[in-house]
Every structure is written in structure tokens, then in C-alpha cells.
């Protein structure tokens, strides 16, 4: 974490924040992400340095749905897989 203030008048207690554990962070005002919310999420493209061609078995109806979304369906599948990966790291 970068503790440098963007303002000389920072009132952030960085020592207290650095000492906090995950359990100390209150999430009562942050709703849990549901599968329905995830399904409606908008995925932004993250440029990748390299891509590897693979053979992947996907249910036919899933593949047809992605194809029906139009051009770039493979990129969209990749973006969804990346978002899932990053959310579970």
C-alpha cells in the first residue's frame, strides 16, 4: 500500500489501517455479490501480453449463447474467466 498522501492535510490514520486484519474490516454496508449480480456484471477489457490457444470443452448451449452475443465472444469468455480468477485469488 502506498502511504504517501495526495494532500498535505491527510487525516487518514495509516498506522491503524496497516494494523487491521481482514476480520477487523466491517462489510455490513457492502452487499455480498450474488450469482445474479455477477451474471449482470460488465467486464472491461484488460490487455494481455500473450494468449495461448487451447481446446476447451464447453456445453453447447453456453457456447451458442456467447456466440449469439456477437463478434468477440471468445474475448468475452476470456474476460469473464479473468474476472473470476482475480476474484478468487
Image: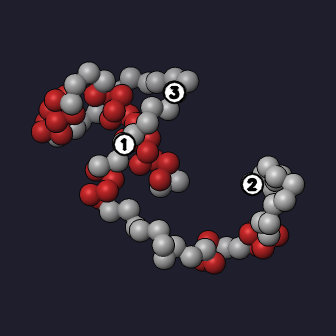
Q: Give the mark nearest the N terminus, 1 or 2.
A: 2
The residue wearing badge 3 is 47
Taking the spot 56% from the left edge, 76% from the top edge, the residue there is: 26
Q: Gap in Å between the C-alphas at discs 1 and 2?
A: 27 Å
Instruction: Find residue 42 and name its label.
Output: 1
Circle 3: is it few (<14), some (14-19), or many (20+) Cα within 10 Å?
A: few
Q: Give the mark nearest the N terminus, 1 or 3.
A: 1
Residue 3 figure quarter: bottom right
Taking the spot 29% from the left edge, 49% from the top edge, the residue there is: 40
Pinpoint residue 78: horizontal percent, then vertical percent.
38, 34
Taking the spot 43% from the left edge, 36% from the top edge, the residue there is: 44
Camera sees residue 22: yes
Q: Gap in Å between the C-alphas at discs 1 and 3?
A: 16 Å
| Residue 50 placement, left or right of 71 | right
Query: Which type of secondary structure does the marked residue at label 1 adopt?
Result: loop
Nearest-to-viewer mark from 1 and 2: 1
Amino acid at each position: 500500500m502506498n502511504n504517501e498522501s495526495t494532500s498535505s492535510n491527510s487525516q487518514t490514520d495509516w498506522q491503524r489501517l496497516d494494523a487491521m486484519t481482514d476480520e477487523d474490516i466491517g462489510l455490513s454496508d457492502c452487499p455480498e455479490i450474488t450469482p445474479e449480480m455477477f451474471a449482470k456484471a460488465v467486464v472491461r477489457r484488460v490487455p494481455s501480453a500473450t494468449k495461448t490457444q487451447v481446446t476447451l470443452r464447453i456445453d453447447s448451449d453456453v457456447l451458442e449463447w456467447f456466440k449469439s452475443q456477437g463478434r468477440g465472444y471468445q474475448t468475452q469468455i476470456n474476460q469473464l474467466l479473468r474476472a473470476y480468477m482475480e476474484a478468487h485469488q
